[in-house]
């Protein structure tokens, strides 16, 4: 479906893509991976024709519908409500609706061949409208908005009133419900909390088109992709499996490439040694010339690009402390003294626990972390630390607190001026910064390097209780895996906020959930938490309400309906039966939409989407038939 043929792309002196060739087949779900800055987003921009290749060809079928989610919100007409913005996902629908209304109006006076032509055109438009998903677009938008964390009461709020992160969620809704043939998702889990990531994963699992996914979230890559495209060092390599398969094959391929490169170097050096040794001897002239030709004919083997290595991210051992780390009793917190963010919180934190704070955005995860860290003082209740407990807190904006023009050495020394320079250098060396690297400004560091520097700054005053707010921000997959490994091996206590499912699943052995039921502690990892909350929701969920089948007043030509009922009692019964059936279908449609928005992991979302489409199709057909019958009797 998508072919890259000898494509090259350069930005200044950086060769991002160097004569790359690969094919994406129809229906494949492809994970696009590689180091930050390797060219993953460039691939998307080339596919969507937002930029041109310097050389080579990119081909795909004509009239293919493309959905492209960027990492940042692109300019759109942003007037109107949140729901209006979401429903503008398919721009082709608006002119179609206008033409349908125009034809319906003109049909009132058309006759003969002109009427036939209009009816034929109307049928084509309605068929295409249905194919594009126009009839159930609003229902699908509402279900997706609910699934990604919006409240139904917010659907009518102005789009501009939402923060940038929530606007990006709405942009994701637009992209998902547009039913594209090719879906390009660039970091779709950015700005999402864990429940929204879980909903997104279930939704995308049922997507039947071609999908390319750029993500640092291993959970999404592992569960949604069946092919992997690696961009690294200007080259693109396609693997015929998902993320786990890719990791295994990449390591094996790298070993093979290293062996081939070593063999090439050995042969080259052997030939060069012979030529150098015997070049001046006339009796060896023929052999020397033969080896020169052999050397010239040798295929050059490039040194393989080593996978990123974050092994230097090791957290130093914590200082000794007691088994009891912290107690929180009857604690409540409010920023304005009115609305309580946290209410009656009771927690006990023990030594060695690795705790993840989870819950919807805005429920108070960062607030609770800052209270635990002592950065905020609660209005009521107590917070007590244990014997010799030393805190180390890293906020979300840790990068902004490191002056970009200051050297790494200066930043660490400023955190503890009593420490000797040799000890500062030793600490920086343990986090991978040695020699002249300690003198470079922090502003030139990559995301992974900034994380290592932030840990070094924390450990210049060694803690035994780490509190980390979104520590995986700006880390690529390798950096996240390294941080996860470091936290698991750390002998101290850690409490962190993260929206990375794989990171939480791998690093945490305790979960603290913050939600409508307050703050609840779970003495197990993420899967244990999901199991317990699923059972709890199954017990607490109310039984489905029985929908009334009493016909509701219709706005579809009510005068014609009343006239028909007056003229013919039998026709009145037919119309009433249609109205009852329509109300049943409306009730079924509402039920399916509620299920789609519920976030219940046990539901089959692909089947529910098919059911919603079928119900909507039946409802539209029945409404058309009702209107036709009412107009006929009214004539």
Image (spheres, grey):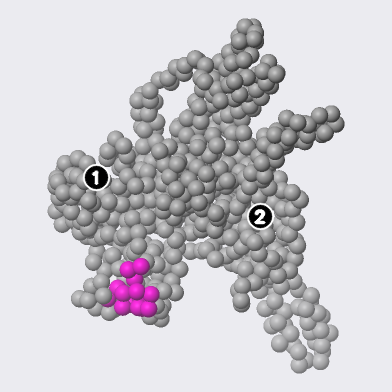
The magenta-colored residue range is: 400-413
Residue drawn 49% across and 56% down? Answer: 477
**Is residue 553 visible in the rendered structure shown here?**
yes
| SS at badge 1 | loop
- Residue beneath the point at 15% across and 57% down: 388
Is 96 left or right of 600, judged from the image as shown?
Answer: right
Q: Identify the image quadrant of the C terminus.
A: top right
**Where is residue 374 shown, x and y percent of the image?**
20, 56
| Residue 293 location (% of width, % of height) | 81, 79
Give residue 490's quadrant in the image.
Answer: bottom left
| The quarter of the displayed image where residue 615 is located | top right
Can you identify the residue that label 1 sits on?
339
In the displayed structure, does residue 396 sit left or right of residue 28?
A: left
Query: Which picture quadrant has residue 40?
Result: bottom right
Q: Residues within 10 Å of mark 1 (few under 14, many from 20)?
A: few
Left or right of residue 520: residue 1: right
Mark 2 — residue?
A: 238
Give residue 400's mark.
Answer: none
Which residue is more in the foreground, 234 or 380?
380
């Amino acid at each position: 479906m998508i072919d890259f043929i000898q494509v090259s792309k350069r930005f200044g002196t950086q060769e991002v893509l160097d004569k790359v060739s690969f094919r994406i087949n129809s229906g494949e779900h492809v994970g696009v991976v590689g180091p930050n800055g390797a060219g993953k987003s460039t691939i998307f921009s080339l596919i969507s024709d937002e930029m041109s290749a310097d050389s080579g060809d990119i081909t795909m079928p004509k009239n293919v519908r493309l959905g492209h989610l960027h990492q940042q919100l692109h300019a759109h007409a942003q007037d109107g409500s949140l729901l209006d913005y979401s429903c503008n996902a398919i721009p082709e629908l608006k002119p179609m609706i206008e033409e349908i209304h125009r034809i319906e109006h003109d049909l009132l006076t058309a006759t003969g061949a002109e009427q036939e032509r209009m009816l034929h055109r109307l049928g084509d438009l309605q068929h295409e409208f249905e194919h594009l998903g126009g009839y159930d677009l609003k229902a699908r938008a509402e279900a997706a908005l609910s699934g990604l964390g919006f409240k139904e009461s917010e659907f009518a709020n102005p789009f501009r009133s939402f923060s940038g992160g929530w606007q990006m969620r709405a942009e994701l809704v637009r992209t998902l419900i547009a039913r594209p043939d090719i879906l390009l998702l660039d970091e779709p889990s950015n700005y999402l909390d864990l429940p929204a990531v879980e909903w997104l994963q279930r939704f995308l699992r049922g997507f039947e088109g071609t999908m390319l996914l750029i993500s640092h979230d291993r959970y999404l890559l592992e569960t949604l992709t069946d092919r992997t495209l690696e961009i690294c060092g200007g080259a693109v390599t396609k693997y015929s499996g998902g993320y786990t398969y890719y990791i295994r094959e990449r390591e094996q391929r790298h070993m093979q490439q290293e062996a081939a490169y070593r063999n090439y170097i050995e042969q080259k050096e052997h030939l060069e040694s012979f030529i150098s040794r015997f070049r001046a001897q006339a009796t060896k002239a023929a052999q020397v010339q033969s080896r020169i030709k052999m050397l010239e004919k040798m295929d050059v083997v490039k040194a393989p690009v080593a996978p990123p290595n974050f092994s230097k991210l090791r957290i130093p051992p914590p200082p000794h402390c007691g088994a009891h780390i912290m107690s929180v009793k009857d604690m409540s917190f409010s920023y304005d003294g009115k609305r309580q963010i946290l209410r009656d919180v009771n927690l006990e934190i023990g030594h060695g626990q690795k705790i993840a704070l989870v819950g919807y955005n805005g429920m108070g995860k960062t607030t609770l972390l800052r209270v635990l860290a002592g950065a905020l003082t609660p209005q009521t209740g107590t917070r007590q630390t244990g014997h010799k407990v030393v805190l180390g807190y890293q906020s979300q904006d840790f990068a902004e607190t490191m002056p970009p023009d200051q050297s790494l050495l200066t930043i660490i020394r400023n955190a503890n001026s009593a420490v000797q320079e040799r000890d500062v250098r030793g600490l920086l060396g343990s986090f991978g910064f040695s020699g002249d690297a300690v003198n470079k400004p922090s502003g030139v560091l990559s995301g992974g390097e900034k994380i290592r520097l932030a840990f070094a700054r924390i450990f210049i005053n060694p803690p035994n209780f780490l509190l980390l707010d979104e520590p995986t921000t700006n880390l690529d997959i390798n950096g996240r895996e390294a941080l996860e490994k470091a936290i698991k091996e750390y002998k101290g206590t850690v409490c962190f906020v993260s929206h990375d499912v794989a990171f939480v699943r791998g690093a945490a052995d305790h979960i603290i959930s913050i939600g409508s039921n307050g703050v609840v502690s779970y003495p197990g990892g993420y899967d244990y938490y999901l199991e317990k909350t699923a059972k709890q929701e199954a017990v607490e969920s109310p039984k489905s309400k029985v929908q009334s089948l009493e016909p509701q007043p219709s706005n579809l030509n009510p005068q014609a309906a009343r006239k028909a009922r007056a003229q013919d009692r039998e026709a009145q019964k037919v119309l009433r039966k249609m109205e009852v059936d329509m109300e049943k279908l409306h009730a079924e449609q509402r039920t399916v939409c509620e299920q789609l928005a519920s976030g219940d992991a046990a539901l089959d979302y692909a089947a529910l989407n098919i059911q919603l489409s079928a119900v909507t199709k039946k409802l539209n057909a029945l409404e058309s038939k009702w209107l036709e019958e009412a107009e006929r009797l009214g004539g």
